[in-house]
Image (tube, grey):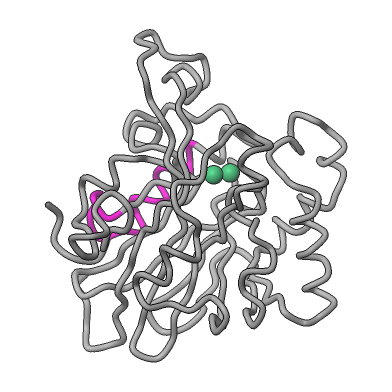
Amino acid sequence: MTATSDETYKVYAIKYGHHDRLSSANFIGGDSHDTSMPLAYFVWAVVGPSRTFIVDTGFDAETGAGRGRSITKPVEEGLAKIGIDVATVEDVIVTHMHYDHAGNRNLFPKARYHVQDREMAFCTGRCMCHGTLNHSFDVEDVASMVRRVFDRRVQFHDGDSSITSGLSVHRVGGHTDGLQVVRVRTAQGWLVLASDASHLYANMEQKRPFPVVYNVGDMLEGYQRLYSLADDPAWVIPGHDPDVLKRFPAASRELDGWVVRLDGVQR
Ligand SMILES: [Zn+2]
Ligand SMILES: [Zn+2]
C-alpha cells in the first residue's frame, strides 16, 4: 500500500528526557547480558498542511526529579524548534495516561485531548487501588483529564478510530488497558507511533515484553498489530528507544540527537 494523493503528514520525534538503567529492567524475567540500556523520553508531532497533532505531552522537570528522570530539553522547546507554538495547538492525542505521556498539564491550553474510553476507565477505576498499577500514573494528570472531560475538551475514541484523513488511533492495550497507537499516512506510506506498546525495538522484535504491563497477552498480540498497521517494519516507532535518534535523520543540523524526522528516508 503506497501513499495516494490524499493528505500526508510530516512526523517528528522530539526527545525531552533520559533515564539510565540496565537491560534487566527492560524485560520481563530480566536480561542475561545486563548491559546499559537507557530509555529516552519522547513526544511526537504529526504535521499536515491544515492541522497539527501533538502525540503525548511528556513530563516537566519537577515530576522528573521526583522519579529520578532527567529532562534533556523541555517539551515546549523542542516543539518550538520545529515551529509549533504550544499555546496554539488544537489537538493532543494521549496514547495512555502514564506520567511520562500525560504530564505538562497546562502546556496546551487550547487543545482538545484524544483519549480511549478504556484508558479513562482504567485510570479512574478499581485498578488504581493497586500500587503496582497506579505507580506509573500521576493523580494530578488524571484529575486534570477528568476536568477536561467536564470542560468538553476530551474527544473519546473506542478501539479503532479515524481522527481525520490519513490519521487514526488503534487501541492495543497490554501496557495499560486503554493504550492506543497512532497510524499516520506519510509520503512513504503508513507509519505507526507505537508509544509504550513497545518501549524499545528489542521488545517487539524479540517479543520480550517490558515489565510494566497490565495484560501480557494483549501486549504480545500488540506487537503483531503494530507491524500489521505499518507499511514497513522500520516504520513502527517504539516509545522509548534512544536508537530512534540514530535511525532517522535530524530535523536540522542543530537538532541532532534531539528532534528527528520520521517520515523521510532513514539514515
Ligand atoms: Zn507507559
Ligand atoms: Zn512511557
Q: Residue furthest top?
A: 32
Bounds of the magenta segment = 220-235
Question: Where 215 sits versus 170, above or below?
Answer: above
Residue 253 magenta-highlighted: no
Residue 229 magenta-drawn?
Answer: yes
Indicate whether 110 appears above or below 73.
Answer: below
Quarter of the figure that contains the N terminus? bottom left
At x 45% / y 64%, what residue is drawn?
A: 77
Residue 75 in the image, given as x and y percentages of width and height: 50, 60
Question: Which residue is at a point 69% across and 63% down the rendered structure image?
Answer: 105
Q: At which x and y percent is residue 192? A: 37, 59
Q: Position of residue 212 (x, y in %)?
A: 60, 32
Q: Residue furthest bottom?
A: 50
Q: Quadrant of ligand 1?
A: top right
Please determine whether, in this image, residue 199 is positioned above or below residue 257.
above
The residue under the point 87% across, 43% down is: 126
Residue at image coords 37%, 20% = 36
Which of these two is toward me, 167 or 47?
Answer: 47
Q: Position of residue 166 (x, y in %)?
A: 37, 78
